[in-house]
């Protein structure tokens, strides 16, 4: 059998997650991986593309570039988009939608860019069919098309994902300022935790960190919760291959021996978290309770704590309240989390200073557009020197 030809793809992600996404792509067998700004390009075949949508935890979407061109004005944009042979990807009975991402002094309105591409595709068909064209369906299109413009450089792509990949499908309820699923997964990857130690989130909110931790530890593909993907509406969709990959992913799931513990002082947050855990099928692996973090008891020994405590820009509140909250969190970690690695994501500089512990690592991340620090604290007994000597 002739080997299927490789083609180029682009996995989009959030700022700061590119290297982790590249590692994920390597893990599914992608080739010629190159890290870009908020994206990673790679090559693979149709199976690689399907696996990327099924397995990538830190990607937003997977695009297949069709054409690159330069457009100095809207007419050049229209003409270049129109000359693509869209009949390879659409027929008169297909529906399509256009998504645009624009950073350009020439094209200042992304919706207008999407409209011009839509007109170009429609006119491409009208000229070949005597006035007939496919319909637009922005809710559930057969084919999703993405136009990216940076200055005058344009890339037209097919969007193989459709709905962004971080919308797993289990989180139908959420509290204020929820954490994005892809960011939560990346935070867990950065911690190095893979399910070999106990895991705690003492301010779990909607439970996103807990669920993503359980998915990683049980080797559960994040795409298993969705039934709709952009590529399933394509002319060349291989549903047999897709079903095979789904079966393989289900067989790859495993049990874990560690404890994954979550808590929150807000009873509504616990209710929301419980629903999200159940929809993800992770209720056998995650234990939650309503309790203030100050009263949270955790298993002794080694473990990982990851949390996203409130900060003023997201939740509201006086800076004095935030500083007190973070000081109490630091005191709690010093008192009861000996042997743990603790990681805190926050946009509050003053709050993080109030933790009162020496950091061992800091990573710049964006959470909902806010610039945050993801900070690590190593909570071992004794001094750093004693810790180093004990490991020699």
Image (cartoon, helix red, strand yellow):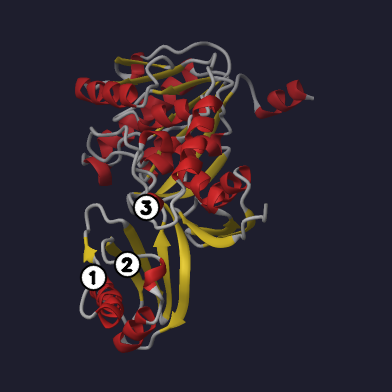
Q: What is the spatial separation of the Cα atoms under label 1 and label 2, in whole angstroms?
A: 7 Å
Tag nearer the camera, 3 or 2? 3
Q: Position of residue 271 (x, y in %)?
A: 23, 21
**Whether residue 191 is situated above or below residue 127 in the rendered picture:** above
What residue did someone put label 2 on? 100
Write down the quadrant of residue 286 in the picture. top left
Tag nearer the camera, 1 or 3? 3
Q: Position of residue 183 (x, y in %)?
A: 42, 43
Q: Quadrant of the C terminus?
A: top right
**Whether residue 186 is situated above or below residue 123 in the rendered picture:** above
Going from N to C along the chain, the mark reached first, 1 or 2, is 2
Q: Which of 128 and 319 lies nearest the eye of the viewer? A: 128
**Whether residue 376 is situated above or below residue 263 in the rendered picture:** below
Query: Mark 3 near mark 2, Cβ–Cβ under 8 Å?
Result: no
The numbered mark at residue 111 is: 1
Query: Mark 1 near mark 2, Cβ–Cβ under 8 Å?
Result: yes
Q: Which of 385 and 273 lies nearest the eye of the viewer? A: 273
Write down the quadrant of residue 234 in the picture. bottom left
Q: What is the spatial separation of the Cα atoms under label 3 and label 2, in whole angstroms?
A: 16 Å
- In-image side of 379 versus 14 (left or right): right
Tell me the SS state at disc 2: strand
Q: Position of residue 98 (x, y in %)?
A: 29, 65
What residue did someone put label 3 on? 230
Circle 2 Cα neighbour tier, 10 Å, few/some/many (<14 / 14–19 / ≥20): some
Q: Which of 154 and 298 lies nearest the eye of the viewer? A: 154
């Amino acid at each position: 059998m002739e080997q299927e030809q490789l083609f180029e793809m682009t996995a989009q992600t959030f700022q700061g997650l590119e290297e982790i996404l590249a590692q994920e792509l390597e893990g599914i067998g992608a080739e010629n991986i190159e890290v870009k700004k908020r994206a990673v390009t790679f090559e693979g075949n149709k199976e690689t593309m399907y696996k990327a949508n099924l397995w990538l935890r830190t990607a937003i979407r997977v695009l297949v570039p069709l054409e690159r061109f330069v457009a100095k004005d809207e007419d050049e944009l229209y003409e270049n988009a129109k000359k693509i042979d869209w009949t390879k990807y659409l027929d008169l009975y297909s529906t399509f939608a256009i998504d645009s991402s624009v950073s350009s002094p020439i094209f200042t309105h992304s919706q207008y860019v999407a409209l011009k591409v839509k007109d170009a595709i429609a006119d491409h068909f009208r000229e070949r069919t005597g006035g007939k064209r496919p319909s637009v369906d922005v809710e559930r299109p057969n084919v999703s098309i993405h136009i990216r413009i940076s200055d005058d450089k344009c890339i037209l792509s097919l969007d193989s994902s459709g709905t962004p990949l971080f919308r797993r499908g289990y989180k139908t309820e959420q509290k204020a300022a929820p954490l994005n699923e892809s960011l939560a997964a990346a935070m867990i990857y950065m911690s190095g935790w893979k399910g070999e130690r106990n895991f705690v989130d003492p301010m779990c909110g909607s439970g996103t960190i807990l669920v993503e931790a359980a998915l990683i530890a049980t080797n559960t593909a994040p795409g298993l919760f969705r039934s709709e993907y952009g590529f399933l509406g394509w002319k060349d969709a291989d549903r047999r291959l897709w079903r095979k990959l789904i079966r393989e992913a289900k067989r790859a799931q495993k049990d874990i021996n560690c404890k994954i513990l979550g808590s929150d002082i807000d009873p509504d947050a616990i209710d929301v978290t419980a629903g999200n855990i159940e929809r993800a099928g992770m209720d056998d692996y995650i234990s939650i309770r309503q309790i203030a973090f100050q009263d949270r008891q955790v298993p002794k020994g080694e473990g990982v704590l990851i949390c996203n405590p409130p900060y003023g820009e997201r939740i509201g509140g006086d800076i004095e309240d935030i500083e007190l909250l973070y000081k109490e969190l630091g005191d709690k970690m010093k008192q009861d989390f000996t042997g743990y690695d603790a990681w805190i994501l926050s946009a509050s500089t003053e709050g993080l200073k109030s933790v009162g512990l020496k950091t061992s690592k800091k990573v710049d991340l964006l959470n909902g557009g806010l610039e945050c620090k993801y900070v690590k604290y190593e909570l071992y007994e004794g001094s750093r020197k004693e810790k180093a000597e004990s490991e020699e």
